[in-house]
Amino acid sequence: AVAVCASHGSAVWRAVRHLLLVEEVGLAHASARRVLGADSLETHLSTLALTTLHCQLALGQLGVTYVKAAQQRKNRLLLAGGGAAGGPPQLSAADFGRHALRFMAVVGLPYLAQRTAVESINAHLERTFLHRLTYSLSVQLVLADGESLAATARSNLTLDAHADALKESVHTIFSLAERKLFSLPKMALLPSVLLRHPRLALAGLPIILGLDAAKSALHAALTDAFEEHRKAEKRADSRLARVVAYDLAQAAQLTAAGSLEL
């Protein structure tokens, strides 16, 4: 029994690590802490996390309200078409058009305005955090330390390329966490759907999970191939930037030697 419980616990932990990206989040957090420092990271990250939590959960609940209102509007098409059992229309086309306009004025436009405003606040804080991260890497860490500057000079990538890679990794983890928080209110509706429509849920859930797994596998394969091309492109760009910087620094000597054609 202990072995069975241990095996189930291990399987659950592997699923949690895969779904919640525990290792990736840990690596991104460790990289940001190494750059910003523990105290500064806690200050900036706590502000960003608290704001993201409030924004995305509120937007998720707002999205649930919007979906319910949109479904009610779509259900009126049954009345305009004669109801579920046929017969004469219970709602004229003009009345349905007025309901659609009312829906856009009362539900659609406020939803669009609220989501745009809240997403803008969240995105602004994320950009501020990423700017602080890249500034600390470029100015406070590398340029203030001779060993770090020498290591960057020996690297295949420039300092800007290292900063962009760090910013991209943190942004990717943040975007994943943001989407999961946004979808949390919708996921909370799953138990009620299972209780009300158990047969439909049991029939459709394996198909949905299978399609999602196939999509994730395809996305991961394409992402890996794309990242390999991007790494090669960044190395080439960094090499070109070093050559251009050296030529600009040695422009007088190159002109005197007549080697500009090279």
Image: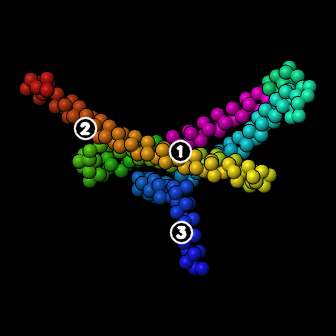
Is 223 included in the stretch rendered in magenta? Answer: no
Pointer 2 with pointer 3, Cβ within 8 A: no
**Amino acid of disc 3:** Ser
Pointer 2 with pointer 1, Cβ within 8 A: no
Is 104 included in the stretch rendered in magenta? Answer: yes
Quarter-of-image position of residue 98: top right
Judged from this view, the residue extending furthest toward the bottom is: 1
Q: Where is residue 75 in the image (x, y as percent from the top left)?
A: 81, 34
First of labels 2, 1 by sequence position = 1
Image position of 152 with respect to 239: above or below: below
Q: Is mark 1 on a helix, strand or loop?
A: helix
In the image, which residues are magenta? Answer: 102-129
Within 10 Å of the Cα at label 3, are there few (<14), some (14-19), or many (20+) other Cα atoms?
few
Q: What residue does disc 3 label?
A: 10
Q: Position of residue 201 (x, y in %)?
A: 71, 51
Identify the residue at image location x=40%, y=40%. Answer: 226
Q: Let me know if residue 74 appears in the view.
A: yes
Within 10 Å of the Cα at label 2, are there few (<14), some (14-19), or many (20+) other Cα atoms?
some
Q: What residue does disc 2 label?
A: 239
Q: Let me know if residue 189 appears in the view.
A: no
